Amino acid sequence: MNIKRIFGALLTVLGITGLIYAAILFANTQGNQYDVKSLAIYGILGIVFFISGIGLVRTTKDEA
């Protein structure tokens, strides 16, 4: 198995986890400055990890 595909899948899972956590924070937010900062941080990191993981899995050739 290709190490790049495994790393891409791991990044994708981390991205999905970050986006789900950001959605949970968004649902439970009170509008405090801390809530908005953490929501932005987890949301941006989730998007970056998700997009980079999908890109890595998609561009890696599967050679046997």
Image: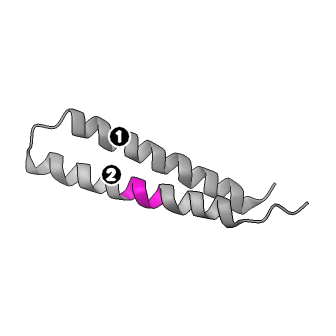
Looking at the rendered structure, the number of numbered marks drawn on it comes to: 2
Please say if the residues under marks 1 and 2 sit with CB atoms less than 8 Å apart. yes
Q: Is residue 58 left or right of residue 47?
A: right
* Residue 20 image position (x, y, % from top left): 39, 39
Q: Which residues are magenta?
A: 45-49
Q: Which residue carries the number 1 mark? A: 21
Q: How far apart, in angstroms, are the residues tagged by discs 1 and 2? A: 7 Å
Which secondary structure type mostly characterizes the magenta part of the structure? helix
Dot 1 or dot 2, earlier in sequence: 1
Q: Which amino acid does the dot numbered 2 rest on?
A: Tyr
Within the image, what quadrant is residue 64 found in?
A: bottom right
On-image quarter of the N terminus: bottom right
- Residue 59's place in the image compared with 33, above or below, is below
Label for residue 47? none
Secondary structure under tag 1 reads: helix
Q: Amino acid at mark 1?
A: Tyr
Estimate the x, y position of residue 54 in percent, counting from the top left: 58, 57
Residue under numbered circle 2: 42
Residue at 31%, 39% (x, y): give it: 23
Residue at the farthest right position: 64
| Depth order, front residue of 61/32 | 61
